């Protein structure tokens, strides 16, 4: 992966974070990584977007399960454009998010709430 330029490590039980500069335009050539870790290993991470708008097709937010950022085997969703996604839930007590933007044209980005939830045991 290219060098990380923004993002942070977050911990439960809950919180909110945004893309850089939100609600103003995010930077071009950004590589942001957020890793959310639940306070307890038997919790899963649930995220809920309040707002979402990325340059469609060129800027992406990849969301994965666990803490192995960028591991394609763990990818849950790859988001782009202005469609506000539904609730996304991890399978483990960690979730990673990777924002990649290209060299031109930005948008407002996203605002997301996260929380650690009890695992749904089937
Ligand atoms: Ca762009």
Image (tube, helix red, strand yellow):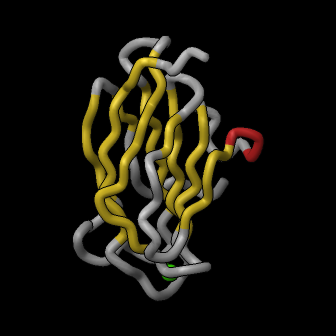
Instruction: Report the side of 75 relative to 56 (left or right).
Output: right
Give above or below for 25 relative to 15. Answer: below
What residue sits 61% from the left and 53% below the top? Answer: 77
Residue 120 position, x and y percent, is 51, 21
Instruction: Choose top left, top right, bottom left or bottom right for residue 37.
Output: top left
Q: Position of residue 16 (x, y in %)?
A: 26, 45
| Residue under the image location 42 percent in, 18 percent down | 118
Q: Does 46 appear above or below 37?
A: below
User: Could you tell me residue 102's position as x and y percent?
Assistant: 56, 77
Q: Quadrant of residue 24?
A: bottom left
- The number of numbered badges drawn on the structure is 0
Point out residue 25 in the picture as x, y percentages from the top left corner. 31, 77
Q: Residue at x 54, y 70 (%)?
A: 80
**Quadrant into which the C terminus falls:** top right
9 lies above or below 23: above
Front residue (pair 86, 59): 86
**Outermost front residue:** 122
Task: Give 97 or 30, whichever is nearer the viewer.
Answer: 97
Residue drawn at 29 percent across, 58 percent down: 50
- Compared to residue 21, the image places residue 68 above or below, namely above
| Nearest to the observer: residue 103 or residue 37 | 37
Left or right for 5, reference 20: right
Q: Residue furthest bottom?
A: 105
**Could you tell whether 91 is left or right of 110 in the image?**
right
């Amino acid at each position: 992966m290219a060098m990380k330029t923004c993002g942070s490590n977050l911990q439960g039980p809950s919180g909110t974070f945004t893309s850089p500069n939100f609600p103003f335009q995010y930077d071009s050539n950004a590589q942001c990584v957020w890793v959310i870790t639940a306070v307890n290993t038997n919790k899963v991470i649930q995220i809920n977007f309040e707002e979402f708008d990325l340059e469609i097709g060129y800027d992406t937010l990849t969301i994965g399960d666990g803490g192995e950022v960028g591991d394609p085997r763990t990818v849950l969703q790859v988001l782009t454009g202005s469609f506000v996604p539904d609730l996304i839930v991890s399978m483990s007590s960690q979730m990673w998010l990777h924002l990649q933007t290209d060299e031109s044209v930005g948008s407002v980005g996203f605002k997301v709430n996260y929380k650690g939830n009890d695992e749904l045991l089937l």
